Amino acid sequence: MTIALLFGTLFVCLLIGVPIAVALGVSALTAIYFGTTLPLSIITQKAFTSLDSFPLLAIPFFMLAGILMGKGGVSKRLLALASALVGWMTGGLSMVTIVACMFFAAISGSGPATVAAIGSFMIPAMIARKYEGGFASAIAASAGSIGVMIPPSIPFVLYGVIGGVSVGSMFLAGIIPGVLIGVGLLITGYLISRKRGYKPEPGEVASFQFKDVARTFWDAKWALLIPVIILGGIYGGIFSPTEAAVVAVVYAVIIGKFVYKELSWKDLYESFRQAIVINATTMIIIGLSVSFAYFMTIEQIPGEISDYLTALSTNPLIILLAINLLLLVVGMFIDTISALVILTPILLPIVVEVGVDPIHFGVILVANLAIGFVTPPLGVNLFVASSVGGVRFERIAVAVVPFLISMIVCLLIITFVPALSTWLPSLYE
């Protein structure tokens, strides 16, 4: 009865368009009120106490750093470098978009932020060069998903906090899988571009020129130093991931304001305002998601799900495939933050019991939810790309299908080859 109330109320709320945070809180309140004798105040207590976490402070600071870098001229220089590297190829602008998103992913830690920063430049540019609008937007939306895979990554911070896994190890674990997904998208984009005849036009980059790469690399050196400083500081024991996020903010202000001189006082104010609004929304979701997950734990729902999955098979690959299928469906309807908070306490004990490394599973979990960024009906990256590119959502949802297939193939490779996720963390240990 209680379980039916919990998930029934959640499903109805999502169906009628109630915001995810409110839906989680209302469903937990309904189940507690009608199905238990627990005090209703437990929802607010857990929501507030869950946010009293030092590692969680990394999330708003990484958000702010990404916004500051987007406004401070970093994205333009990364685009110029990407153009020199791959702009001469068939479908050059689409290749540039993907490579630039991979660069920016190493700065922002956020999928939607990556789409907004790179897509706002590249989608209009591709459409102006006769690229089909849905394809141009789908490229940016898909490549933006890499933002949660290549460190620093906000979902990796959250997973590390919830699962008791080293955030630094998770950052290392995401590098190779993130690059793998990027390569998969590059191959897909190239094949589609070759079929449609998207070639560089006169005036664009005609061929690979080492001098152009060297020039744009030097121009972007301050931007490229950001991930080096962040990751080097963490793994060198100089500062924690949370302190690294603060360092990233300070560095972004200095570079944007005093080196590139493109970050005005108005931009600085607007960056802080955007970060505050986004973080407020995120923290509400995290708090109420924790309350929802806590109530499920009290009702022993994770244990029942664990028993069901282990009854199906004790083969870790079979269980991981079943979990992948579940996560792909969940990612279509629930945002990444909520899904991480709710599902990590449920699924992590199951996979650990059958011998899966928690670091490997964290990468699988985040990779699945990264795909959720571009799967309708939620598909946050699709909405961002639609907004910045002025292309209808429906057109993007159709055009993104080949990229979805590519990302799922990469997900299966990540699932079946644990070393892709665990090799770099093992070197650090």
Image: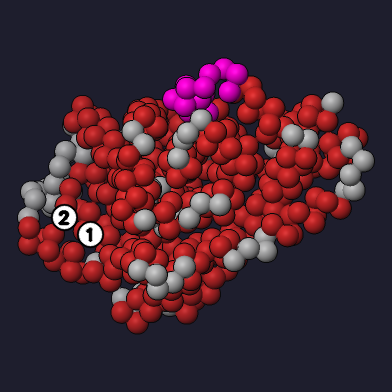
Q: With respect to residue 428, does 95 lie above or below?
A: above
Q: Residue furthest bottom?
A: 258
| Residue at left offset 84%, top offset 26% | 1
Q: Are marks 1 and 2 in contact (CB under 8 Å)?
A: yes
| Residue at left offset 29%, top offset 35% | 184
Q: Secondary structure at mark 1?
A: helix
| Residue at left offset 74%, top offset 59% | 48
- Where residue 265 sits: x, y (%)? 47, 79
Is 316 contained in the magenta span?
A: yes
Camera-side residue of 392 and 179: 179
Q: Which residue is mark 2?
A: 84
- Where residue 42 sits: x, y (%)? 83, 51
Q: Residues within 10 Å of mark 1 (few under 14, many from 20)?
A: many
Q: With respect to residue 184, does 172 lie above or below?
A: below
Camera-side residue of 305 and 17: 305
CA separation in Å, label 1 and label 2: 6 Å
Mark 2 residue type: Ala
Q: Residues within 10 Å of mark 2 (few under 14, many from 20)?
A: many
Q: Which residue is mark 1?
A: 80
Is 114 displayed left or right of 343 in the figure?
left
Mark seen at residue 401: none
- Where residue 326 sits: x, y (%)? 55, 27
Is 346 displayed left or right of 142 in the figure?
right
Camera-side residue of 180 and 249: 180
Is 225 displayed left or right of 119 in the figure?
left
The magenta segment is 310-324
Image quadrant where one finds the C terminus:
bottom left
Does residue 97 appear in this view? no
Is 417 contained in the magenta span?
A: no
Q: Give the overall secondary structure of the magenta segment.
A: helix
Task: Classify residue 378 by image quadrant.
Answer: top right
